[in-house]
Structures are given as C-alpha cells and as structure tokens.
Image: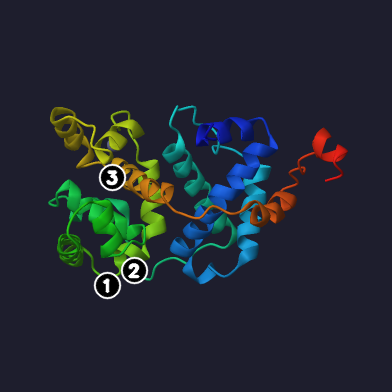
C-alpha cells in the first residue's frame, strides 16, 4: 500500500517514527528548495535546515492540521509558511530601499486583469518570467508584458521607484496580503479546482469577480500554484540520508524485529 501524505500527517500527529521518517525524507528537499529560492544567500548553510527542523519538531503548530483526504498541497502551504517564518526569525531580511505597501500596489494595479495581477504577485514570490509563465500556463512574453505594464503603473504612482520594487518589497507585501482576508474570500478548494481544471465557467466567473480586487485571494491562488510545483519536486532523501536528521530530531530508531534478532542481523 502506498504511504500517503495523509498517513504521514496522522502518524506525525501521533508522534510515530514512520511519520517523521516520511516527513524528513520527502520534505527536507522541499525545505532546502524553499531556502535556496527565498533566501539564496543562505542556501549553503546546512545548519539553517537543522535549526528549522528542530523548531518544526518542537512546535508542530499549524503544520499537521489538515484532515483533507488529499492534503498534500494544504500541507505544503503550511510547511512553506513555517519555513519562511522561522527563517525570517532566524535572521530578518533588511527592509527595501524604496518601500511599497499593499494599498499603493492595489490602487496602482487595479486596471490589470486577474492573470496579469498573478504574474506580478509571483514576482513578490521571487519567480522570474520562466517559472511564472509555466505556473500561469502562459507564454513567457505575456508574463514579461504584464510586469512591464505593472512597472509603468507603479512608476507613475510612486515618488521613488525602481524596476525591482515589487520583488524588493516581497516579504512586506506578502505579510500584508495574508492579513487582508475577508468573510467573502474563497477556500483553497475553489482555487485548486481552477488549477486542476475542474471549475465550471460559472463558478470561475463568480470567483473572479471577488478575486480580481482581493490581494489576499490572489496571494492564496499563487501560493497554491507554487504548492503544485513543490509537490512534484523529485528526489526524496534515502533512508541513510534521512537518518542523521531523525537522530537530530530525537526520533527513536526502529527496534530490531524478533526475527532479525534471532538471525543476529
Ligand atoms: Zn478574498
């Protein structure tokens, strides 16, 4: 039987070795990938991964909450939030030279379409045009044009501007969008239905009316697009590669089975 993300969440909640072994094997590569992407200057600090793992093990808050029958992307969202939060606590990113707040961004970019807004938002998440266009299933040129249009709208609106102002203010903008949720915001399932091609035309147009002017939902949509990429990252750790991390986390080794003991293995 296949051991699923659902099984891992259940076993980690019960603090079973099998759950933690699966967590380390499948998600240490994701944690490394997130650090390399969001904190490239800290990519070569293996101790950071260790500190993050210890804090995730010490407090599993919000990490294993999802009881969805297919929870992997919900779990990846929670894991990403914890990893980015812990890495910021470990060492805060310095503020941007030219500050851009969410209100100014929302006003300036109001004329853009929902797809163009996502192309811009993925820039706050440090994605350049190639991965952005893949996530949005558009030609790279379309992503480039959306960002050029946004840059022009922001340049007119801001007294001090530079081309990288959206990416420079990523952490602040993402933090503000997370807090900007309303009772009308859509749940993850609605976005996943669109990403996976299950949404009907009428569901989609009703949703777009709200999401087009809600940066909390645009952020949520983009994070779920990112989670769909993270889910497909290859190369889990082997048992031998995972073992030092399990030791670090104080996860007890598997007791040798009766038959193995009998055979002296
Ligand atoms: Zn919303």
Q: Badge 2, how many Cα within 10 Å: few under 14, some, many 20+? A: some
Up-down: is 36 above or below 55? below
Quote the CA–CA distance across marks 1 and 3.
23 Å
Horizontally, residue 185 falls left or right of residue 64, namely left
Marker disc for residue 97? none
Whole-percent x and y of residue 214?
25, 41
Under tag 1, what secondary structure? loop
Could you tell me which residue is drawn at 70 percent across and 52 percent down?
Answer: 243
x and y percentages locating residue 39 in the rendered image: 48, 65
Q: Quadrant of ligand 1?
A: top left
Residue at 65%, 49% (x, y): give it. Answer: 55
Q: What residue would you read off at disc 3?
A: 218
- State the SS at label 3: helix
The residue at which mark 1 appears reads as: 162
The circle drawn on residue 98 is 2
Are the residues flagged by discs 2 and 1 in contact, CB closer than 8 Å?
Answer: yes
On whether ligand 1 comes within 8 Å of the CB at mark 1, the answer is no
């Amino acid at each position: 039987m296949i051991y699923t993300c659902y099984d891992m969440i259940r076993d980690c909640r019960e603090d079973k070795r099998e759950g933690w072994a699966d967590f380390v094997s499948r998600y240490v590569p994701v944690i490394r990938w997130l650090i390399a992407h969001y904190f490239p200057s800290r990519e070569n600090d293996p101790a950071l991964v260790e500190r993050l793992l210890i804090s995730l093990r010490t407090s599993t808050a919000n990490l294993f909450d999802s009881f969805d029958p297919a929870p992997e992307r919900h779990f990846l969202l929670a894991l990403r939030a914890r990893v980015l939060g812990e890495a910021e606590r470990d060492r805060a990113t310095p503020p941007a030279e030219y500050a851009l707040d969410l209100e100014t961004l929302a006003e300036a970019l109001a004329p853009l379409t929902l797809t163009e807004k996502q192309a811009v938002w993925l820039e706050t998440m440090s994605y350049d045009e190639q991965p952005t266009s893949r996530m949005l299933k558009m030609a790279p040129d379309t992503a480039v044009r959306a960002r050029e249009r946004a840059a022009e709208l922001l340049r007119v609106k801001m007294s001090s501007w530079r081309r990288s102002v959206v990416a420079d203010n990523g952490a602040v903008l993402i933090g503000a969008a997370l807090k900007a949720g309303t009772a009308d915001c859509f749940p993850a399932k609605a976005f996943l239905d669109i990403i996976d091609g299950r949404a009907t035309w009428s569901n989609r147009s009703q949703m777009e009316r709200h999401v087009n002017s809600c940066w909390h939902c645009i952020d949520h949509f983009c994070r779920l697009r990112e989670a769909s990429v993270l889910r497909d990252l290859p190369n889990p750790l082997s048992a031998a590669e995972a073992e030092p991390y399990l030791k670090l986390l104080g996860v007890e080794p598997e007791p040798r089975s009766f038959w193995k003991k009998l055979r002296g293995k």
